[in-house]
Image (cartoon, helix red, strand yellow):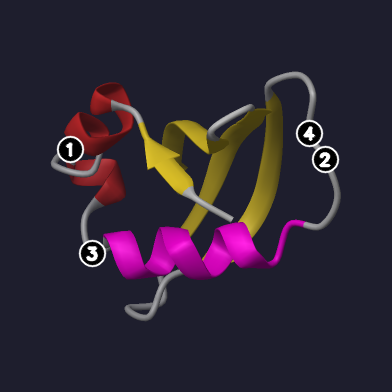
């Protein structure tokens, strides 16, 4: 499955709350989400390699799975 990360989500990775969360962490989290997601849905409780917890808002579109935003804890 193709993973598409919006510019907004990439920009959020540079914020303090999302520090130490990288693209590999997001890709790993995306693989843990099963099924089809027709509407934007928040998935909670992912943990990055650095130990930082984060949530993802994701939606499936025709060209792949879209990461709308990343919320660090």
Badge 4 density bin: few <14, some 14–19, many ≥20, Cα 10 Å: some
Q: Which residue is mark 1?
A: 15
Instruction: Name which quarter of the figure residue 71 lies in.
Output: top left
- Please indicate whether residue 72 sits to the left or right of residue 59 in the image: left
Could you tell me which residue is drawn at 65 percent across and 58 percent down?
Answer: 45
Q: Is residue 72 visible?
A: no
Image vertical order of residue 28 relative to residue 38, above or below: below
The answer for how far apart the CA atoms under marks 1 and 2 are is 29 Å
Image vertical order of residue 44 relative to residue 42, above or below: below
Image vertical order of residue 53 relative to residue 69, above or below: below
Q: Which residue is mark 3?
A: 20
Q: Which residue is mark 2?
A: 36
Disc nearer the start of the sequence (1/4): 1
The answer for how far apart the CA atoms under marks 4 and 3 are is 27 Å
Badge 1 density bin: few <14, some 14–19, many ≥20, Cα 10 Å: few
Q: Which residue is mark 4?
A: 37
Could you tell me which residue is drawn at 23 percent across and 43 percent down?
Answer: 13
Q: Secondary structure at mark 1?
A: loop
- Residue 28 coordinates in the image, percent (x, y): 51, 70
- Seen from the viewer's position, the closer of residues 18 and 62 is 62
- Residue 55 coordinates in the image, percent (x, y): 56, 45
Q: Secondary structure at mark 4?
A: loop
Disc 4 vs disc 2: Cβ atoms closer than 8 Å?
yes
Could you tell me which residue is drawn at 63 percent across and 66 percent down?
Answer: 31
């Amino acid at each position: 499955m193709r993973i598409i990360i919006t510019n907004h989500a990439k920009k959020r990775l540079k914020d303090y709350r999302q520090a130490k969360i990288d693209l590999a962490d997001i890709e790993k989290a995306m693989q843990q989400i099963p099924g089809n997601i027709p509407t934007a849905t928040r998935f909670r409780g992912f943990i990055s390699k650095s130990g930082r917890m984060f949530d993802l808002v994701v939606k499936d579109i025709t060209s792949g799975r879209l990461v709308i935003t990343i919320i660090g804890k």
